[in-house]
Image (cartoon, rainbow, N blue to C red):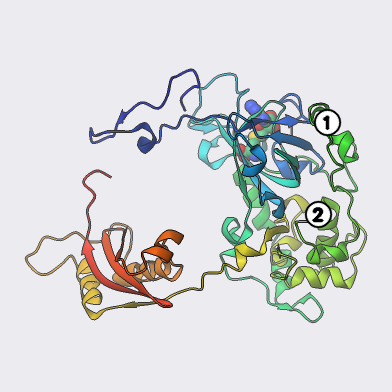
Amino acid sequence: MRGLEESGPRPTATPCGCIKPALETGNLLTEPIGYLESCFLAKNGTPRQPSICSHSRACLRIRKSIFNNPEHSLMGLEQFSHVWILFVFHKNGHLSYKAKVQPPRLNGAKTGVFSTRSPHRPNAIGLTLAKLENVEGGAVYLSGIDMIHGTPVLDIKPYIADYDSPQNLMEPLVDFNLQNNQPKPNTVFQCEGKNDSYDQRQLSGYSDSQPHCSTEEKPTCPEDRTSKESYPRCDSTGEGQQTLPMHRERATDFGLESRNDQSPSVAEEQIVLCGLENSCPEEGTDEGPRSEEGAVEGAVEGAAVLQGSSVDTQPTSPLCGARRADRAPHSVVPAWVREAPVAPLQVRFTPHAEKELGQLSSGGEPGVDQPSFRYFQSAEEARRAIEAVLEADPRSVYRRKLCQDRLFYFTVDIAHVTCWFGDGFAEVLKIKPFLSPCS
Ligand SMILES: C[S@@+](CC[C@H](N)C(=O)[O-])C[C@H]1O[C@@H](n2cnc3c(N)ncnc32)[C@H](O)[C@@H]1O
């Protein structure tokens, strides 16, 4: 990654010799959107992952040099409970990196850098999933962080479990009996599956190796403080900061709470999890106050949407045998994420397009030199990909509203697809081979 001292992105050559603008070759000139004010002043003692210390606190103020009105850029973010923070490991000391590293968790054994969360990597970029405590004006208040004070932050993105958690992309492992919130008997096996999560921790290298903080045990964290006490630096610069919503009412409010008002506190999330884990016969410990039935119901329903927010609830069985930090956190997203106003489209292919698709996978007509798929293994796979793309209506709002009758083109693998959209459907008209001159 290029340093700030350089004047700007310069054109660079691609492997095939074409000169392209720097951005197109991935040479990004970054400018931090802000510098983190963190409760951790130095690398030493800073948790290796955010899950280790849920009480850690930080504040990020969006710089005015990025947006004249930083608060505009944060509009709507308060509706999310968690955010991804992309940042620069600015205190790495050197920019060197090695293909194999020794993550502390492997205790001396080496593994490939890309299978770890090591700070020392080709581009010194870190990625942390933090809890969003509050948004006030142009400032974002976070908890559960593993970055030090002064860390340059490159970006904030909302955490959306539907997109970001593989558990949401796979068939649920547990069939819940929603009446009494008990997993059906076959989930006992899942609850016993401790090895899986252990293996994953081993592989990720930097995950929870230390005693982690919970509401009840906090060996390495600062005291749980009131919001103002938690952000001394922010308070010193930010006038009129309000008390952060750290202390919430009861877990029963959790599933029914609008993110607009307040997010559930860490403690509440844990209460909900405790309520769920008590349904797991493996887990005998009772680490926190038991939630009331209502709270558990709200959680198990998962997609419960009220007051503009939607609570994500993960299947609990893989979590039963795991420790708290291994569990996918419940998260809150605004309702629009799950209730998009755009209905899925019906997708159909003209007979002509069907024929062309078949020809692509078979390498074309005899005697004609035609490429076959690079990524898909069959025409059927390509067809499913094309269907999925179109079903979700890939058109921009502008196109949808103002250029409805225009043909729409896109390319997937070597298929250049031409289609059109009608009321509630998309129809594929043509599929031609496409080979990029310079990919
Ligand atoms: C293992 S990294 C993981 C960071 C992030 N969660 C990730 O996976 O990319 C976390 C460690 O990086 C170090 N660290 C945090 N902020 C840093 C910074 N700005 N520059 C260099 N090292 C930093 C701290 O020692 C912390 O324990």
Q: Is residue 174 above or below residue 19?
A: below
* Horizontal arrangement in the rendering, residue 346 relative to residue 30 (left or right): left
Using the image, tell me which numbered label, if any, was put on residue 1. none
Q: Nearer the viewer, residue 166 or 432?
A: 432
Q: Residue 398: horizontal and vertical position, in percent?
A: 43, 59
Report the residue marked by disc 1: 235
Q: Residue 382: horizontal and vertical position, in percent?
A: 33, 67
User: How far is the residue under mark 2 from the one under mark 1?
Assistant: 20 Å
Q: What secondary structure is found at the residue carrying circle 1?
A: helix
Q: Residue 109: horizontal and vertical position, in percent?
A: 59, 35
Q: Amino acid at mark 2?
A: Gln
Q: Identify the image quadrant of the C terminus.
A: top left
Report the residue marked by disc 2: 262
* Residue plotted at (50% across, 28% down): 98
- The part of the image, by quadrant, that contains residue 292 is bottom right
Q: Nearer the viewer, residue 146 or 236?
A: 236
- The part of the image, by quadrant, that contains residue 352 is bottom left
* Horizontal arrangement in the rendering, residue 68 relative to residue 439 (left or right): right
> Between disc 2 and disc 1, whose residue precedes?
1
Q: Residue 116: horizontal and vertical position, in percent?
A: 57, 39
